[in-house]
Amino acid sequence: MEDIDSTVVLKEKLLAAGIDEIISHGVSDFSLRRVASACGASCAAPYKHFKNKDEFIKEIIAYVEEKWEHLSIQISSSFDDPAERAAQLCVANVRFKISNPLFGMSNAFNEKLSSEIEKICSEKSYGNTEERLFAVTALCAGTATLIESGQLDNCPGTFALLHDKIIAELD
């Protein structure tokens, strides 16, 4: 049992170090040696868990997407009001994107947000689902970009403003 636990822990460490490696050096200069070194593991350690560098990078992206999926399920099940649920998903997504720069490689958020906005539009007999989806997605992407560039503060006030703007768009 201890061997299985240590194997899982090492794999988690490798994934976390792989995320840091991509953030620091990009995909084109990704080094399995640096990842292994960051974990205090041998150069061969990543190959015990991943077939090759490309598979490792795919696994990193899947790992980040899985973290988002767990968070979004938790949020979705916590709010009954569809507009509040969508606003909370958007705020969480922007925070998640800022904390996990690799998340931009995923389409999981747009699929979940589309589904929520379609529900809202059908329940409230709104037309222009695509326009509302565009506006909400633009608010999220724009807020994330402005925070990442330092033009907006990464603070509760910014997220409260984003939340209120999304609610206004969906009401």
Image (cartoon, rainbow, N blue to C red):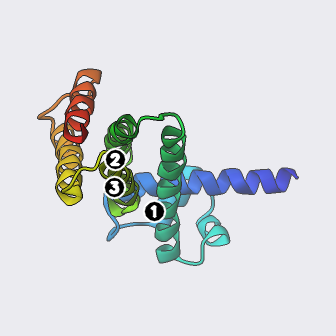
Amino acid on which disc 3 is placed = Glu
Mark 3 or mark 1, which is nearer the start of the sequence? 1
Question: Which residue position holds label 1?
Answer: 61
Give the mark count.
Answer: 3
The residue tagged 2 is 120
Q: Which residue is mark 3?
A: 118
What secondary structure is marked by label 1?
A: helix
**Is residue 10 shown left or right of residue 106?**
right
Q: Nearer the viewer, residue 164 or 70?
A: 164
Disc 1 from disc 2: Cα separation: 30 Å
Image x and y of residue 11, in percent: 64, 57
Q: Which quarter of the picture shows residue 85? A: top left
- Residue 14 image-quadrant placement: bottom right
Left or right: where does residue 121 sit relative to residue 9?
A: left
- Pick whichever, 28 or 81, lies toward us: 81
Q: Is residue 65 left or right of residue 92?
A: right
Element assignment for label 3:
helix
- The Cα–Cα distance between marks 2 and 3, rounded to whole angstroms, is 5 Å
Residue furthest to the top: 157
Badge 1 crowding class, 10 Å Cα cut-off, few under 14, some 14 to 19, many 20 or more, is many
Q: Are marks 2 and 3 in contact (CB under 8 Å)?
A: yes
